[in-house]
Amino acid sequence: MGKKLYRSSGQKMIDGVCGGLLEYFGLDVSLTRLIFVGLGLLMVILPMVLFYLIAWLVIPLEAKN
């Protein structure tokens, strides 16, 4: 049988998710936390940037009188 993924009881800040990933993949706990934060920011910021670019292309410029 292989390794099992679980939430860590020793390496935890909130609930041990990053600590469990650390122990499963053998990574640095700070690195896994930075990856989680980076992915969270990308999931929020990237759709906002795409929406703005689409709006920039679709919405016409104000006509000058």
Image (cartoon, rainbow, N blue to C red):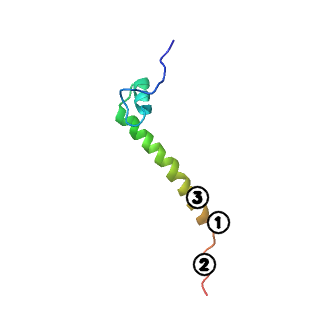
Give the image location of residue 26, x and y in percent: 39, 25
Assign the C terminus to one quadrant of the image.
bottom right
Sequence-wise, the earlier of marks 1 and 3 is 3
* Proximity of marks 2 and 3: CB atoms separated by less than 8 Å: no
Q: Which residue is mark 3?
A: 51
Check contact, mark 1 vs mark 2: CB within 8 A: no
Q: Is residue 62 above or below residue 50?
A: below
How far apart in space, not on screen, are marks 1 and 3 (Cα)?
10 Å
Q: Position of residue 2 (x, y in %)?
A: 49, 15
- SS under mark 2: loop
Q: Secondary structure at mark 3?
A: helix
Residue displayed at 40% across by 37% down: 14
Q: Tell whether 2 sits left or right of 59.
A: left
Total marks drawn? 3
Give the amino acid at mark 2: Glu
Residue type (three-letter) at the residue carrying disc 1:
Val
Q: Nearer the viewer, residue 56 or 20?
A: 20
Task: Using the rendered view, name the quadrant where residue 19 is placed.
Answer: top left
Q: Are marks 1 and 3 in contact (CB under 8 Å)?
A: no
Image check: 21 left or right of 63?
left
Position of residue 22 measured from the top left corner of the image (x, y, whole percent): 40, 28
Q: Where residue 8 sits: x, y (%)?
A: 41, 26
**Badge 1: few (under 14), some or many (20 or more) residues near its Cα, within 10 Å?**
few
What residue is disc 1 on?
58
